[in-house]
Image (cartoon, rainbow, N blue to C red):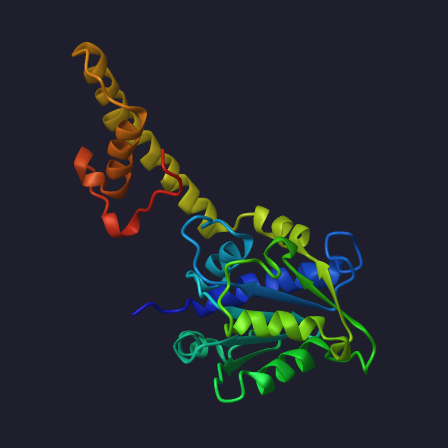
Amino acid sequence: MAELNVERFYERLNKIHAQFLKHREGSTWNAAHCISIIRGPSDDENIYLKSSMVHHYLFGYELPDTVLTLGKGGQCTVLATKKKCEFLEPAVGRAPKNGSVTNLNLLVRNKGDENAENYEQLLKAAREGENGANVKVGVLTKEFKNSGRKEGSIIIGWEKKLEESSSKIEVVDVTAGISLIMAIKDEVELDLMKKSSVLSNKVLKHGFIPRIEEVIDSSLKVTHEALAAEIDAIIEDPSKINLKVQKDFVQSCYFP
């Protein structure tokens, strides 16, 4: 079963929070009081949504139909299914004392009241320290209220809650702020990029070029799609070109 890297989770969450606090009043964060990352259902047609990237960045995995909020005071609250909360449970109570993130609170989906109490808890966390004043909640605007979501999902209810006049919430865009933070790679990400570059080079040298030479020399007719499929298969299973890389550790980010 997958396990959360707690140390990396807090290191990156603190990185987001620190930059949020420092530049919150600027145009990249639009004076938001709270960040709300809303991850919808899995979408095979659009696998590089910003929310999906944030999940991989923080958790190492994607957790569909999940709401995460991060307030100015450092409270991080996550609303998800029981199984996803169990995945995140090891991080509860383990926030580093030298970071600005103070706590992780997990809310388990409750079908009984359609998450009414959970939404109130999320709203309370978003309004932390604002004493009844209107609050700006930062979201990834392009994904907010996106089509294709199932009625009754966690995120639809939360989006509706944010737009209720009684909530006194103004939704603002924080996509630019999130993007700037994730553009700066840490040591783990740089190492993965180096390894990916080496693998890509090996596939080009020992897979693609020999195959192109064979097609030309033998006057074969091969479509671009068929050739791309062959190269993609090599990337997914490097043993095809005698590389000792476990295929479980490799995934093609784009079809060639």
> Residue shown at 27%/21% (left/top)?
209
State the residue in front, 83 or 163: 163
Q: Is residue 173 above or below residue 101?
A: above
Image position, residue 71 (x, y; %): 68, 72
Where does residue 163 sit, x and y in percent of width and height?
A: 71, 71
Height in image: 76 above or below 144?
A: below
Q: Is residue 7 above or below residue 225?
A: below
Residue 194 rendering spot, x and y as whole percentages: 41, 40
Q: Report the side of 177 relative to 204 (left or right).
A: right
Residue for point 57% across, 70% down: 156
User: Residue sitting at 73 percent across and 57 percent down?
Assistant: 29
Residue 202 seen = yes
> Residue 72: in sight, yes or no?
no
Q: Quadrant of the C terminus?
A: top left
- Whether residue 134 sits left or right of residue 180 in the image: it is right
Count the marks: how many?
0
Q: Quadrant of the N terminus?
A: bottom left
Vertical arrangement, residue 58 with respect to residue 184, above or below: below
* Front residue of 201 and 237: 237
The answer to which quarter of the image holds residue 219 is: top left
Q: Nearer the viewer, residue 51 or 180?
A: 51
**Image coordinates for residue 214, horizontal then vertical, percent:** 19, 17
The reply, left or right, for residue 84 in relation to residue 74 is: left
